[in-house]
Amino acid sequence: MSGALSHIRVLDLSRILAGPWAGQILADLGADVIKVERPSEGDDTRHWGPPFLQDAAGQHPPVAAYFLGANRNKRSIAVDMTQSEGQRLLRELAAHCDVVLENFKVGGLARYGLDYASLKAVNPRLVYCSITGFGQDGPYAARAGYDFLIQGMGGLMSLTGRPDGEQGGGPMKVGVALTDILTGLYAANAVQAALAWREKSGEGQHIDLALLDVQVACLANQAMNYLTTGVAPGRLGNAHPNIVPYQDFPTDDGYMILAVGNDGQFARFCEAAGDPALAADPRFATNQARVENRATLIPLLNKLTIRRTTAEWIRVLEAAGVPCGPINTLADVFADPQVQARGLRVELQHAALGRVPQVANPMRLSATPVEYRSAPPLLGEHTDAVLSALLGLSAADIARLRDTGVI
């Protein structure tokens, strides 16, 4: 392996999405990620379907698309950590690793001797990343945390959806488990920062990462809108709280996105729409004025945008230098020429399922590009290879462990 992290080995005890997403990022960058799963069952998301992917002959258990989305480039070992011998194996593996990822409840791994304090004693250079719903301390620390729950508690759903009183009004979650994804991104960044510090200090450390913390941090400008004014922003549907017009608009055959970022773009839009006087109107001439007079302006713009199809608007507005675009289905997304040119769909050969589709990693590194080495693994596909190579176990040792249900 020649990736930027090809010198790093990760013991991934996490499951579901936030931890595995972090592990996949590290694996894409070249790290050797060893995914630890429960014998027979594996990661819960192997069964979160439909949809499932199955081999043509139907000889292997189907695998949920959910699991396939977050576990490529990893090696899977099946170890029962509830058994003392399984715990011993994992501690010995941790001694050979640089990073541990886990997302058990606070204190949940201590009874297995797999918490940070226990593994630090085995490997003082270990970077140990704990992902929980609410963090290692505070009044909610013992609670389980799930993406949907955190989107609500962390304020995102108060900002997402149409306003109360409008048709379809009310709080709405984002269409993907965004808090989990963002937590995975933060985890991958934190791990690499800790590894960089270890290069200077020689010491590992514990990373305490909470879904709630991440969600609050990612409120971004909306959090600052509240903190600077004391007024909580409300739901605006697809509109922007600070920029107008910056939302969806009806067209003759559907909808389009209009993303006007400055007064010059607004003037060019009005010209292209056949109503240049709107841009000269003092109520709409500046962005501040447009935000203040949003309720008056948007209905006027709706009457203009309905006159052309989405494709016609995109052609006209792109020529005028006004940012705009369609609202694509996923079929549209993967048929888009820009998406295809950037290679955002890739396929990897799976040990049982044949060619497995994947969404490409968006990071483009010129010297150490992302690698697509292997499809998401079969459950326990690499158990024998990892235990023999890293721990020196013989075929007889491995057979005994399998006979006793440890692996």
Image: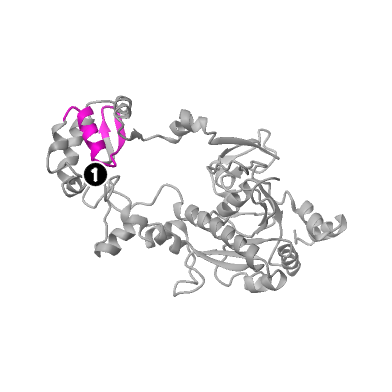
Q: Give 43 or 371, whichever is nearer the viewer.
A: 371
Q: Is residue 329 left or right of residue 273?
A: right
Q: Residues within 10 Å of mark 1 (few under 14, many from 20)?
A: many
Residue in view at x 17 percent, y 39 percent: 299
Find residue 266 and report its horizontal and vertical position in percent: 23, 37
User: Circle 1 — which element?
Assistant: loop
Residue 89 drawn in magenta = no
Residue in view at x 46 percent, y 57 percent: 147
| Residue at which label 1 appears | 244
Q: What quarter of the picture does the C terminus occupy?
A: bottom right
Number of disc labels: 1
Q: Is residue 85 left or right of residue 296?
A: right
Find residue 230 and report its horizontal and vertical position in percent: 25, 65
* Residue 293, above or below 133: above
Q: Which residues are magenta?
A: 250-275
How did the renderer colour the structure? Answer: one colour
Which corner quadrant of the image does residue 310 belong to? top left
Q: Examine the rendering and report whether any part of residue 284 can be seen.
A: yes
| Amino acid type indicated by mark 1 | Val
Find residue 70 and report its horizontal and vertical position in percent: 57, 48
Find residue 164 and report its horizontal and vertical position in percent: 23, 52
* Residue 357, above or below 393: above
Q: Examine the rendering and report whether any part of residue 113 can be seen.
A: no
Q: What quarter of the picture does the N terminus occupy?
A: top right
